[in-house]
Image (cartoon, rainbow, N blue to C red):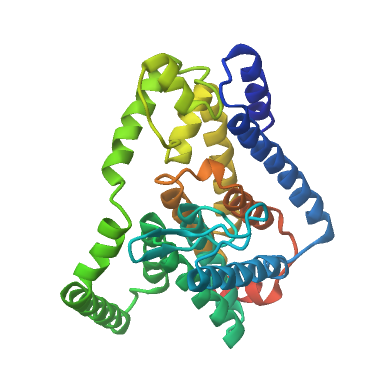
């Protein structure tokens, strides 16, 4: 992480910085991630339990969901303090809420990031409050009308569903097949009675931007080829392709990984990938025989899906929440006797 920060600082000297706002924004994110990493490591000295630490995240999710519902009802953001009359984005009959993110696509990403943690919280303590927080987050994500957020949560549910179903006897196999038949029946009913309306909202009223994003990815790769090692400059994609490739793209790169590769080059992309792989491998090693394992896998895969069709590099809250969760899981060292008993059972 420190290597990434130093290289970004050197970019200001060696490369043309057209957009200082984007440059400083992304640099600040990396500096804050390093501070979060150090904070989480320091916190481990106090022998915390992850179940205690995620409570603030649960509270944040509840407030964020309520804010989203208020935004949907009133049509106002309520968090843009410079403009109290700022309205949420609306397309035809579609009103897209954003919560605290100030970006409806980012809000959909946030819903996908929070879902595994809220499900973990509910399964640890099944009560109406935790169930309400989980349901409200799903409703909030639906109201963002973020298609990749929907897909990420569906994949997370499928991972959870497959993990929890044991195929060690005929009864469980029959039960699994029965669930598949029920799901298939629900899909058929959805297709017959609601598909046209659903398609109208998500692709016609909301706007079909998928084709445009693949065109953008082609532009981004063209920019990468010009400076594969050093990158074109952090936060400089739009200005760089105009001034050097004579191309125009009104949007920032809608993929966090591709953005890191293009703007940071291999010098930043490789450390970034290695940093994430290292954390993931450490988490898998630590939790592979524990109940938390499946939720961590859901979180990692859900985040990977959601952040690579949206410009997650500019959704600071999403990045901080995702890595804070990973860091807290990584450095937790308090013995949970209840979990330890279950681990012994599975062993």
> Which of the 4 image quarters holds residue 187?
bottom left
The picture places residue 227, in percent across and down from the top left corner, at 45, 16
> Which of the 4 image quarters holds residue 146?
bottom left
Q: Nearer the viewer, residue 142 or 285?
A: 142
In this view of the protein, can residue 347 be seen by the observer? no
The picture places residue 276, in percent across and down from the top left corner, at 56, 41
Residue for point 75% across, 64% down: 334
Q: Nearer the viewer, residue 304 or 237?
A: 237
Q: Residue furthest bottom?
A: 128
Whether 47 is drawn above or below 74: the answer is: above
For the N terminus, the image quarter is top right
Q: Residue furthest left?
A: 192
Residue for point 61% across, 81% down: 125
For the C terminus, the image quarter is bottom right
> Which of the 4 image quarters holds residue 195?
bottom left
In this view of the protein, can residue 116 be seen by the observer? yes
Residue for point 57% across, 30% down: 271
| Numbered label tally | 0
Whether 307 is drawn above or below 89: the answer is: above
Whether 344 is drawn above or below 12: the answer is: below
Q: Residue furthest top?
A: 14
The picture places residue 261, in percent across and down from the top left corner, at 47, 29
The picture places residue 18, in percent across and down from the top left corner, at 56, 21
Residue for point 61% across, 47% down: 316
Q: Residue furthest front?
A: 85
């Amino acid at each position: 992480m420190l290597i990434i920060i130093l290289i970004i600082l050197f970019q200001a000297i060696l490369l043309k910085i057209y957009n200082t706002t984007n440059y400083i924004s992304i640099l600040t994110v990396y500096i804050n991630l390093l501070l979060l990493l150090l904070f989480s490591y320091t916190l481990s000295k106090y022998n915390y339990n992850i179940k205690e630490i995620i409570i603030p995240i649960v509270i944040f999710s509840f407030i964020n969901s309520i804010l989203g519902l208020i935004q949907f009802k009133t049509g106002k953001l309520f968090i843009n303090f410079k403009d109290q009359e700022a309205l949420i984005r609306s397309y035809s009959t579609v009103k897209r809420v954003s919560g605290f993110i100030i970006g409806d696509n980012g809000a959909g990403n946030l819903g996908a990031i929070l879902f595994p943690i809220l499900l973990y919280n509910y399964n640890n303590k099944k009560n109406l409050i935790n169930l309400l927080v989980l349901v409200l987050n799903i409703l909030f994500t639906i109201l963002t009308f973020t298609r990749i957020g929907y897909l990420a949560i569906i994949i997370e549910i499928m991972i959870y569903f497959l993990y929890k179903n044991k195929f060690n006897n005929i009864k469980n196999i029959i039960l699994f097949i029965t669930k598949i038949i029920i799901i298939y029946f629900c899909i058929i009913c959805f297709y017959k009675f609601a598909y046209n309306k659903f398609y109208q909202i998500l692709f016609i009223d909301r706007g079909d931007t998928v084709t445009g994003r693949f065109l953008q990815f082609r532009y981004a790769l063209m920019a990468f080829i010009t400076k594969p090692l050093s990158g074109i400059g952090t936060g400089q994609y739009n200005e760089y392709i105009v001034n050097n490739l004579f191309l125009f793209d009104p949007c920032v790169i809608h993929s966090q990984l591709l953005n890191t590769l293009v703007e940071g080059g291999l010098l930043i992309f490789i450390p970034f990938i290695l940093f994430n792989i290292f954390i993931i491998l450490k988490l898998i090693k630590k939790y592979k025989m524990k109940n938390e394992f499946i939720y961590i896998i859901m979180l990692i895969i859900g985040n990977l899906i959601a952040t690579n069709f949206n410009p997650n590099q500019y959704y600071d809250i999403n990045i901080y929440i995702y890595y804070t969760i990973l860091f807290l899981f990584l450095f937790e060292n308090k013995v949970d006797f209840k979990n330890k008993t279950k681990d012994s059972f599975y062993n």
